[in-house]
Amino acid sequence: MKLKHVNCLKGFLPSKIIFTIFVILYVSGFIFAYFKPFLARSFFNGGFFLGYMDVKFIFPHTVAFNYIFNQFVLFLGGVSAHLFLNNLGVSLACVFTGIPIVSVIFLKLFTSMGAVNYLLMVKVGIIKAFLILGGSFHLYFEFLAAMLSVDAFLKFYRSFFHFLMQRNFKEFKEDILTDFLPLILRIIILLAIAAILDVFWSTWWVYILTQHYVPWINFYMGFYSCKII
């Protein structure tokens, strides 16, 4: 039973080559920002990680069940759902077309976060930068989902081209059902967790470290909107 759990968790890990590409691009973004900080600021928008966020609050006069349901389920849950669907759309585009892989995953995610890491360290110091990025748990799930999306792209077209060469539909079908589709399911799970954490945790976490402290329940009880400025 334990072995099955371990194998299941290993399925969420990217291939070594994709992880290596991630590390290289992340470090490259960090080095680029070190030598060209002004260009890095213009190329890579740190957004709310650098504290450029304008959060609006509207606190209720009375707290009732309807308000809690509308606020946490319909509103905040709706924001999470929209974020999830948007990220899922990008991931599926990466998997089946490969078009957004370089521009979105390699540059806007991997390289960008390396640059933002350095810019954040310069702005708030190493310790606080570590706390901000280290506590933004949604990032880890987004990174894993992005790396698995690239793996899924390679896996799908490797099987597809093998099918064209061998004309063995049965083998192609087995590859899709036993290897490719479970990978897509893992990506969906990771993106769903990332969207929930982004809205219900990371927004508050970055806010209290870059703006001022507000208790979690007070923050989300009156949370109305968050704009990147």
Image (cartoon, rainbow, N blue to C red):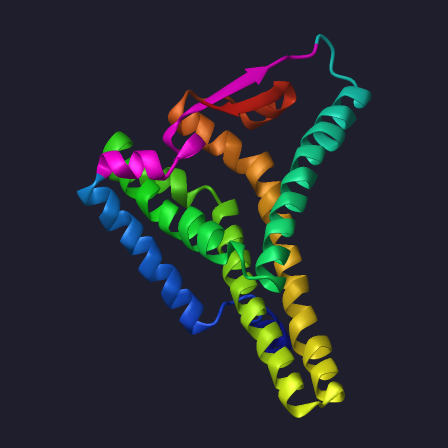
**Magenta span includes 171:** no
Judged left or right of residue 90, residue 102 is left
- Farthest top residue? 61
Residue sitting nearer the eye, 117 or 151: 151
**Magenta span includes 39:** yes
x and y percent of residue 70 in the render?
Answer: 77, 25
Residue sitting nearer the eye, 122 or 171: 171
Q: Residue at x 66, y 85 (%)?
A: 163
x and y percent of residue 187 in the render?
Answer: 62, 59
Residue 34, located in which quarter of the rendered image? top left
Give the number of callouts.
0
Q: Considering the image in quadrants, where does the C terminus appear?
A: top left
Judged left or right of residue 45, residue 77 is right
The answer to whether 138 is drawn above or below residue 171 in the figure is above
Q: Residue at x 45, y 51 (%)?
A: 103
x and y percent of residue 212 in the render?
Answer: 42, 20
Q: Residue at x 74, y 11 (%)?
A: 62
Q: Residue at x 69, y 12 (%)?
A: 60
- Farthest right residue? 66
Answer whether residue 128 is visible to the viewer in this image: no
Residue sitting nearer the eye, 152 or 6: 152
Q: Considering the image in quadrants, where does the N terminus appear?
A: bottom right
Answer whether residue 155 is visible to the viewer in this image: yes
- Farthest left residue? 35
Q: Which residues are magenta?
A: 37-60
Judged left or right of residue 19, residue 35 is left
The answer to whether 22 is drawn above or below residue 116 in the figure is below
x and y percent of residue 95 in the render?
Answer: 60, 63
Residue 184, located in which quarter of the rendered image? bottom right
